[in-house]
Amino acid sequence: SMISIYVLINRNQLVFDRANGTMEHRRRDFHGFTRRSFPLAYVDRVYVAKDTPKLGSLFYQINDGMDAGHHRFLPTNAKLETTTEAAEAINAWLDQVRQT
């Protein structure tokens, strides 16, 4: 008999580059590596959609360009407290960048 084991590795990163004025969503999974880049001026906010009382999904909202809309950051939901803290920290940073 033959046993096959698949290891699914999935890594997501949101990179905010103030010097270049961009936000980049990087994703690596078993299909390969993808990246999507947006001007920081197009990034309206990051928010959490509550899936269950303890789980949420992190989204970012793009307000301009061909990719305008709501984009899911992680392919699955995550701990609500962690996603909420991440969204608050990112939005505070975006607010700070916009004021300078």
Image (spheres, grey):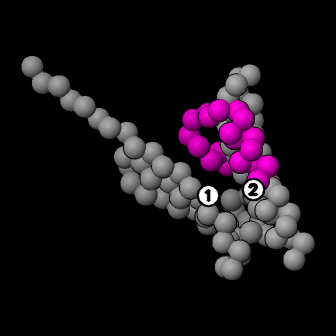
Q: Position of residue 38 (x, y in %)?
A: 67, 67
Residue 35 place in picture, x, y as percent: 53, 61
Direction bottom: furthest residue: 19
Find disc 2 in the rendering and name its residue.
90
Please identify, in this view, whether the residue under mark 2 or under mark 1 is nearer the observer: 2
For residue 39, what is the image quadrant?
bottom right
Inspect the image, locate mark 1, and give the three-letter code of the amino acid beneath it. Answer: Leu
Between 7 and 43, the one lying in front of the other is 7
**In the figure, residue 98 lies in which quadrant?**
bottom right
Q: Which mark is residue 64?
A: none
> Is 96 situated left or right of 70 in this image?
right
Q: Which residues are magenta?
A: 69-90
Seen at 70% across and 33% down, the residue is 80
Mark 2 surroundings within 10 Å by alpha-carbon count, few (fewer than 14), some (14 through 19), many (20 or more): some
Q: Is residue 8 above or below residue 65?
A: above
Which quadrant would the C terminus be assigned to in this image? bottom right
Callout 1 secondary element? strand
Quadrant of the snapshot with the N terminus: top left
Residue 6, placed above or below residue 16: above
User: What percent of the width, then of the height, locates residue 55?
Assistant: 67, 28
Report if residue 23 is visible in the image: yes
Q: Mark 2 touching mark 1, by CB under 8 A?
A: yes
Q: Residue at x 65, y 45 (%)?
A: 72
Which residue is depicted at the point 53% across and 58% down?
26
Residue 32, image x, y percentages: 39, 54
Q: Residue furthest right?
A: 99
Neighbor class of circle 1 (other Cα within 10 Å; few <14, some 14-19, many 20+) is: some
Q: Indicate which disc, 2 or 1, sits on the residue closer to the N terminus.
A: 1
What residue does disc 1 label?
A: 14
